[in-house]
Amino acid sequence: MITTRTVIKPKQQLGKYRIECKLGEGGCAAVYRALDTIEGVRVALKVPFQNRINDSWLNEFKREIRINAQLHHPNILPVKNAEILEGLPMVAYPLGERTLADRLRSRISVETSVHVIDQLLDAVAYAHGKKVLHCDIKPENLIMFSGHHLMLSDFGLAKITLRTLRASGSGTIGYVAPEQAMGRPSFRSDVFSIGLIVYRMFAGVLPEWPYDWPPPSFDRLKQKTHEDMIALLQRSMELDPRKRFRDARAMKAAYRRVRGKVLRFRQRRTTSEPDEVSATKRDWRTVRRRQFLREYGAALETEFVCGKCDGPVSEAMTTCPWCGDNRTVHDGGTRHPQCCPRCERGMKLDWPYCPWCYGGGFEIQTNRRLSDSRYVGRCSNTGCERRELFQFMRYCPWCRTKVRRKWGVADSEEHCSGCGWGILSDYWSHCPWCAKSIISGAS
């Protein structure tokens, strides 16, 4: 039976791949972290939704793989394996640490930005040299590995240029060039997308239609980079494609001429501003959040950032305590070996239940009794087999009993008047456990 979504669960075996958790999904497919049980390595496994699969889609699937197979470059994500398993076409790729979209949720230094731009232009210039235009360059398709090594992925919309290139409007809203949205993509369209990504890295804001110049946060851009780099960005983001660089190779050549100026500009600003002057220019929210991280970051494991306000959050928080944004589904990965497909929070291999969202039962993947220093509480069910709890668990991972304990925050005696769990009213505006406003809700 054809369904709207392919139902794939953790622990499910697809050929030699054992599914561990879902990493994300787009309009046509989902991507899972999976273990290659033969090679013993983890991969990113791309699996299409069943309702998308037909003869035309299969032809496009094969075309994407063949285009990718032509491109051998250290900054282009290679295909490890492509096959049809149990009637589903799927592709295995090397597993990265996160996407550039994930990385951009927190501040990024000029030095790191320059390193990323180097690799992005190298990858796209190489593809353009092979007469391949990508058509969907965006942060979500830029995979980061250790050491800020970047790889361009997802050539599903890629086109090999012919004497006359015809294509329907395609791409991702927010990063697609205006002429590409009208069905007339070219190498200059990829240049436009690169310009938007680089602008966002420096200015912290993504320009939007009608792309008037100067875009939002232009003052911040001027503070962070050299005027020649700004001129390069303005040219790459011209509405008239004829005024842009003809392709990524031309853009790369122009960028190489200003790259040193970008780095020297940042060094001059850093050395010319005394620490006390720089401190007065910092946004007060940044100062407050840094203070919070020094005092409570380790205890609360706030190693993630809110996608809306960039505030530090932990995996267990279901609400951003800084802006109140809903975090029912966790976004940002986990240190655990697998994650719940419902809330996407981490799970240990010996937990039969999700302790964060009351998700369904899972097949235990190991018979070993896995110890962990983070077990700090006990389940109230005396008949529970293990009874061990992490801080801020909502349900027992062994018996699914609701946790009655009112978890507190280390070194704080404040508690939310709504749920009774610990809060920090000096820093937060919302309870991260029940979303109640803290302004008048502390006790």
Image (cartoon, rainbow, N blue to C red):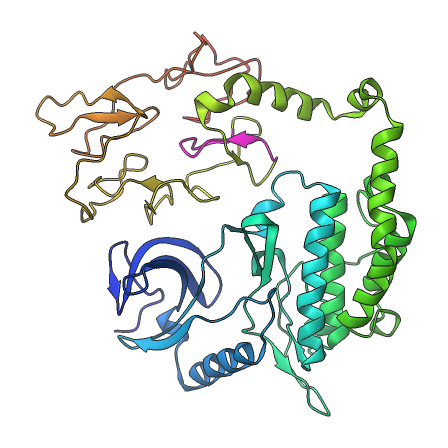
Residue drawn 41% across and 26% down? 433
Residue drawn 73% across and 92% down? 163
Vertical arrangement, residue 24 with respect to residue 388, above or below: below
Is residue 113 at least partly visible in the picture?
A: yes
Left or right of 267, for residue 148: left
Vertical arrangement, residue 193 with respect to residue 108, above or below: below
**Magenta-colored stretch includes residue 3:** no
Q: Quadrant of the C terminus?
A: top left
Q: Where in the figure is residue 280, as x and y percent of width and height?
A: 80, 20
Q: Which quadrant of the view contains residue 368? A: top left
Q: Where in the figure is residue 364, as x and y percent of width and height?
A: 18, 46
Vertical arrangement, residue 256 with respect to residue 227, above or below: below
Residue span colored magenta:
310-320
In this view, the residue farthest toward the left is 383
Residue drawn 19% across and 23% down? 379
Q: Where in the figure is residue 66, as x and y percent of width and height?
A: 51, 82
Vertical arrangement, residue 407 with respect to residue 118, above or below: above
**Magenta-colored stretch includes residue 317:** yes
Q: Which quadrant of the view contains residue 360? A: top left
Q: Where in the figure is residue 80, as x and y percent of width and height?
A: 43, 70
Q: Which quadrant of the view contains residue 36? A: bottom left
Q: Looking at the picture, tell me which residue is in the foreground, 118 or 29.
A: 118
Image mark count: 0
Residue drawn 57% across and 19% down? 294
Left or right of 423, for residue 83: left
Question: What is the chief secondary structure element of the magenta stretch?
Answer: loop
